[in-house]
Image (cartoon, rainbow, N blue to C red):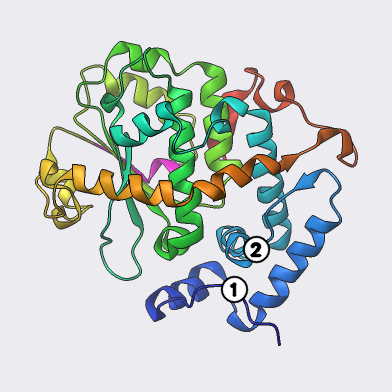
Amino acid sequence: MVNLAIRPVPEPLCKKARAELNEQPERIQEDIALLRQWIAKSPHLRSRIDDQFLVAFLRGCKYSLERAKEKLDMFYTVRTMSPELIRTRDPLDPKTREIIRMGVGVPLPLTDGPDAPRVLLIRPAAYDPPRTTIEEVIRVSTMANDIMMLEDDNFVIAGQVGILDLSNVTVNHFLQFTPSFVKKMTMMSQEASPLRQKGFHYINTPSGFEVVFNMFKNLMSEKNKSRLYVHGHDMESLYKHVPRRLLPMEYGGEAGPIQNIIDKWEQKIIAYRDYFLEEDQYGTDEKKRPGRPKNAQTLFGVEGSFRKLEVD
C-alpha cells in the first residue's frame, strides 16, 4: 500500500473528522487518488496534487467527491480571474512584506481545546487607505490561508472563528468595498474555499455600523446569521465565546503581545517563499475548459452578486 503524505491527526481531531466530515481513514487514499485522476483528466486545470493539499478539499466538502471537484475548480478559477488578489505573492517583495508586518489579519496561536477552531483576529485599521489597497491586504491574507490549509489541522477540520476589530476604521476603509470586490471576496471565501467558517465576532463597532450590518445580514441564510455576533465595545461579551486566554494582551488576553505573533507569522510566510513563487504555474486555462469557458464578467458581474451571500 502507498503511504499517504498526510500528517497524522491527533485523536480529538480524528474523532471530529469522522463525526462531522465523514472521514474514513481507510478510504482517504482512494478518495485522494480519485480526485487526482479527475485533475489529470481536466485539460483546463493546473492544480497542485500533493496529498495534504487535496485532503483539505475533501475534508472541507465532507468527502463529497463532486463538491470537492467543484471547490477545487473554483479555487483556481477565481484566482485566475482575480490577478490583483494573487499576483506578487513574493514575501520578500517590499510592499508585500510591509503588509505582512502590519498584521491586518493575524491567526492566533492557541485554540480552545485540541479539537477547537482556529481563531483569526482581523484589524483593518492596521493599514492606511489609499496608501495600501484592500486588494493588497487580501493578497497577504490568502498567503496565510494557504499555509494554514497545508499545516493547521484545527483550521481545516474544526474550522475558523473570526474576530473583526473595527476600532479606528475610517470611511476610507469602507469605500474600498466596491460591489465587485464584495462579490469576489464572497466567492473566494464561500464557493472557492474548502475552509469552514464557524463564527464571526464584531468588536469595537462604530456608530451606524448595525445599519449596514443588518442590510447584509438580511441577505444571509439562517445558518450564516446564527454565526454572527456584534459585541460593540463589550469585551466581556466576546470572552463568553472566545476565552480571553486565547487573545493577545492588547485585547485583555493571555497570549502575549500581538507583535510577537505578527513576527512569527512573518518568518513563517518567508519560509514558504518558494511555495508562493511556484504558485504562478497553477490556475485555469479557459481556452481548454470542456464546455463553456468562464470569464470575469460571468463570475463577478455586479448583477446578482448579493444572492451569493446565501450560499452555505
Whether the magenta-drawn stretch holds residue 224 is answered as yes
Is residue 183 placed above or below 148 in the rendered structure? above
Q: Is mark 1 in CB contact (under 8 Å) with mark 2?
A: yes
Against 182, residue 266 (above or below) is below
Judging depth in this view, the residue of 60 and 283 nearest the camera is 283
Q: Is residue 48 magenta?
A: no
Q: Amino acid at mark 1?
A: Ala
Mark drawn on residue 50: 2
Q: Secondary structure at mark 2?
A: loop
How far across and down, in percent of the image, does residue 137 sit? 42, 29
In the visual, does 305 lie left or right of 136? right
> CA separation, marks 1 and 2?
8 Å
- Mark closer to the chain start, 1 or 2: 1
How dense is the environment of label 1, judged by Cα within 10 Å: few (below 14), some, or many (20 and up)? few
Q: Position of residue 307 (x, y in %)?
A: 59, 29
Looking at the picture, which amino acid does disc 2 mark? Asp
From which residue to which does the magenta span run? 223-230
In the depicted structure, whether residue 183 falls above or below residue 62: above
Q: Quadrant of residue 237?
A: top left
Which residue is denoted by mark 1 in the rendering?
A: 5
Regarding residue 137, the answer to whether it shows in the image is: no
Q: Is residue 242 above or below residue 292?
A: below
| Count of numbered circles on the image | 2
